[in-house]
């Protein structure tokens, strides 16, 4: 039934979480089938008179019980992320022990920082894995973390790569010192990553519009919490403009570091990693824009999470494994 003021109007028959419209209603819509056959349409704005609307949203917040989403694709990505974090921890331990036991070329501080940021990017999956309607979390907080964790973690990752690449690109130029100090690299990293962090904090503090909103799903029977900002298509990608700028700068800087012999030819590894990260970024962002609007909000999350898993995995496989 469709609400028209204080009255209702029958629009069709509900079955299998879809609504088959009556001939009168179907005539007002464009048919999906070329042969003109009847089509099923999602029942999103209607209410079935014989089914009660179930409100599964929670607003109590707190640190009590919370639930993870149970989709198979998310379970696979969380498993990959857990393996990646374990690998990053093992590599960090290996590099730390090696630096203490023998003399190696260059400081390993930025390598350890890069591994820590890789773990951060993997951890950005957690807001997407958390059900915003579980009783132990606040849906507003979950949606806010989904929106801000992605650009902040990506910016930190590419800021490490870019600050290190700048050092490699300038260290071998004639007339310049043989290396750039760790303090200079740290300053560049803080400047590059801190800008995105400051932008996210500013929006969090001054934003008046809520991060979450209730949405009817399940054939008009279930009221759930929705995060509209992370499923907005192009507007969400525009929020990542600064991150894309950092990635583009890393890609443009790659030819200047590919021949660097410093730190076990780290420049060549950064060059390959930058190119692969750019390819992965194009893949998930294009899928986000194309697949999400066609197949539904579920696929927006799939595309974002795929990028959060693939890009740090590229860093581990390309930058660190060849050094072991």
Image: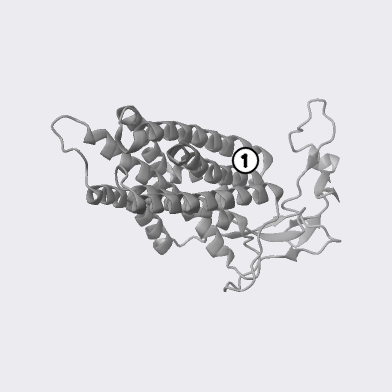
Q: Residue at x 61, y 59 (%)?
A: 130
Q: Residue furthest left?
A: 175
Examine the rendered structure and indicate whether residue 204 appears above or below residue 184: below
Residue wearing tag 1: 292
- Spot occupied by residue 157 in the image (x, y as percentages of width and height): 41, 46
Examine the rendered structure and indicate whether residue 85 appears above or below residue 294: below
Instruction: Say whether residue 172 is left or right of residue 59.
Output: left
Examine the rendered structure and indicate whether residue 24 appears above or below residue 198: above
Q: Residues within 10 Å of mark 1 (few under 14, many from 20)?
A: many
Q: In the rendered view of the protein, which quadrant contains the N terminus? A: bottom right
- Spot occupied by residue 77 in the image (x, y as percentages of width and height): 62, 48
* Residue 107 in view in this figure: yes
Nearest to the observer: residue 210 or residue 273: 273
Q: How is the image coloured?
A: one colour
- Spot occupied by residue 320 in the image (x, y as percentages of width and height): 44, 41
Nearest to the observer: residue 256 or residue 143: 256
Examine the rendered structure and indicate whether residue 158 appears above or below residue 70: above
* Residue 229 in view in this figure: no
- Spot occupied by residue 131 in the image (x, y as percentages of width and height): 64, 60
Q: In the rendered view of the protein, which quadrant contains the C terminus? A: top left
Nearest to the observer: residue 249 or residue 147: 249
**Which type of secondary structure does the marked residue at label 1 adopt?**
helix
Q: Residue furthest front?
A: 101
Task: Name the image quarter holding residue 57.
Answer: bottom right
Q: Residue at x 40, y 38 (%)?
A: 247
């Amino acid at each position: 039934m469709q609400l028209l003021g204080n009255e209702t109007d029958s629009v069709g028959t509900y079955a299998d979480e879809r609504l088959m419209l009556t001939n009168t209603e179907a005539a007002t819509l464009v048919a999906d089938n070329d042969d003109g056959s009847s089509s099923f349409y999602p029942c999103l704005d209607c209410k079935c008179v014989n089914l009660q609307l179930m409100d599964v949203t929670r607003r109590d917040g707190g640190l009590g019980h919370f639930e993870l989403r149970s989709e198979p694709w998310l379970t696979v990505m969380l498993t990959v992320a857990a393996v990646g974090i374990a690998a990053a921890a093992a590599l960090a331990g290996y590099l730390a022990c090696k630096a203490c036991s023998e003399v190696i070329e260059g400081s390993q501080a930025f390598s350890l920082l890069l591994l820590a940021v890789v773990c951060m990017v993997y951890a950005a999956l957690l807001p997407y894995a958390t059900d915003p309607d579980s009783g132990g979390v606040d849906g507003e907080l979950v949606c806010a973390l989904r929106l801000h964790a992605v650009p902040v973690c990506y910016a930190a990752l590419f800021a490490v790569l870019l600050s290190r690449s700048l050092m490699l690109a300038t260290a071998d130029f004639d007339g310049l010192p043989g290396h750039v100090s760790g303090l200079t690299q740290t300053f560049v990293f803080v400047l590059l990553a801190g800008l995105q962090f400051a932008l996210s904090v500013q929006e969090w503090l001054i934003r008046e519009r809520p991060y979450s909103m209730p949405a009817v799903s399940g054939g008009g029977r279930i009221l759930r919490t929705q995060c509209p900002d992370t499923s907005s298509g192009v507007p969400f990608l525009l929020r990542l403009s600064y991150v894309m700028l950092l990635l583009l700068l890393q890609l443009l800087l790659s030819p200047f570091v590919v021949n660097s012999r410093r730190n076990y030819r780290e420049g060549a590894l950064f060059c390959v990693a930058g190119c692969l990260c750019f390819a992965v970024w194009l893949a998930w962002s294009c899928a986000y824009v194309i697949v999400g609007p066609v197949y539904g909000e579920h696929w927006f999350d799939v595309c974002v999470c795929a990028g959060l898993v693939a890009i740090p995995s590229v860093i581990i496989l390309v930058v660190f494994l060849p050094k072991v």
